[in-house]
Amino acid sequence: MLNAFEIIETVNMIDKENLDIRTITMGISLKDCADTDIDKACEKIYSKITSYAENLVKVGEDIENQYGIPIINKRISVTPIAGLVDVLENPTVEKCVKFAKTLDKAAEKTGVNFIGGFSALVHKGMTKGERLLIESIPEALAATEKVCSSVNVATTRAGINMDAVAIMGEVIKKAAGLTAQSGGFACAKLVVFANAVEDNPFMAGAFHGEGEGDCVINVGVSGPGVVKCALEKVKGEPFGVVAETIKKTAFKITRMGQLVAQEASRRLNVPFGIVDLSLAPTPAVGDSVAHILEEMGLEKCGAHGTTAALALLNDAVKKGGVMASSYVGGLSGAFIPVSEDAGMIDAVKCGALSIEKLEAMTCVCSVGLDMIVVPGDTPASTISAIIADEAAIGVVNTKTTAVRIIPAPGKQVGDVVEFGGLLGSGPVMPVSKYSSEIFAKRGGRIPAPIQSLKN
């Protein structure tokens, strides 16, 4: 039973501390939409998505109005489209792009913000369909508004597919070039994973996993501002108190997410999947993960001690959130995107935060190098090497890591690229001037680490 204090506390979190539900994401299986004929497959895809998600946006808005809880995004994720490409008769890049346009059309019809799942899982090898889908990503993302793409190139059990890593460097460069007028915006809708999870509700990496049912509701919460405000009340206290404060706050945030998830599940008559309790920042003032770390005593995010502070934050968020819901999943922890976090942007601009420090931080955060803008003339081989480094962190530490990097055409270090909305603005960050070309072109597979032998 809620008491008056808890009600007032939640209202204050929403009204003054930027607490929100970041996304309600409906996962839809498209396995039964496979067909050898591209037109028939697209017809089935459009029909199924628009039927299942017909009321998704309305239900989200109804819950928002009834409970006064802001629900920022309503989204859809589908099973990786590469599986449908493999079934086609004479698959081509053009047919892959037609799949993407069908997804975009369905997203527009249902009114969702984004649709994820233009994806391929190629951590150990590539089928013809998967290779074609990857090749089509730049054109597909440039030709659509709401379609998001992801490629999983590594797992702890399989190692790192360096052939796929090399290709993704080229794909990212081409995607940036095709959307040069918007600062390479297509790359903001593309993420390269190691150990991708099947129930992630956040974009650009959401897809409906092979092990999931026909349809499911996953919810992603947020709340960096709430955690920051809570820590302001324990200034000077030891880290045990800091951890306990974050745990209690994460519990409250996740309980709200659980309520929304259960309500959405009931009203849509779709099974409830998970609550992802990640702290997802925004460019808004007071909604920054970097500012949480600074509240712990760092002059600026990126100073020595940042990785330790982030490790504490990530662990405490998980410990508090897991007590609030029986079904916690997705990525769950703290995100550190640069362009989407006002504090991260400031830290980069003043020189406190580099790509190298961000890479170290990804060892202990939820994902990886996220919304990083680099010079437009950065070689594809350097981008591939950055992906390989991040994949290695994920594979060796048995965690999800990812790279969402934007080589902004025509931009140099010190420039700022404006994306708008939740994607914010990205200061262009320097990369190493030394070449990784020979390394990136070796190909083959980096073997799985010894800890993969757990059976």
Image: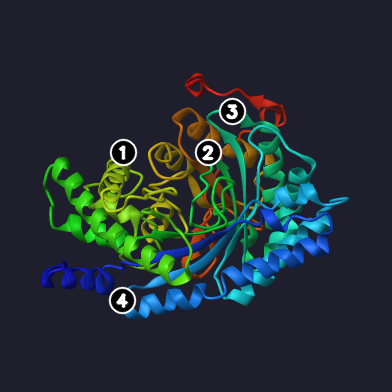
Amino acid at circle 4: Tyr
Q: CA distance from mark 1 to mark 4?
A: 42 Å
Vertical side of 105 occupied by 184: above or below? above
Q: Are marks 2 and 3 in contact (CB under 8 Å)?
A: no
Structural crowding at the residue carrying mark 2, measured as other residues with C-alpha within 10 Å and reported as few (<14), some (14–19) or many (≥20): many
Residue under the point 34% across and 39% down = 307
Q: Which mark is residue 159?
A: 3
Residue under the point 63% across and 74% down = 108
Where, quadrant-wise, is the N terminus in this rendering?
bottom left
Q: CA distance from mark 3 to mark 1?
A: 31 Å
Amino acid at circle 1: His
Q: Can you give x and y, in whole percent of width and height, for residue 50 in the image?
A: 63, 72
Q: Which residue is mark 4?
A: 67
Left or right: 200 with respect to 238? right
Q: Nearer the viewer, mark 2 or mark 4?
A: 4
Q: Nearer the viewer, mark 3 or mark 1?
A: 3
Could you say which quadrant of the image residue 175 lies in?
bottom right
Question: Which residue is nearer to you in this view: 154 or 276?
Answer: 276
Question: Which residue is nearer to you in this view: 15 or 64?
Answer: 64
Q: Which mark is residue 304?
A: 1
Q: Which residue is mark 2?
A: 195
| Element carrying mark 4 | helix
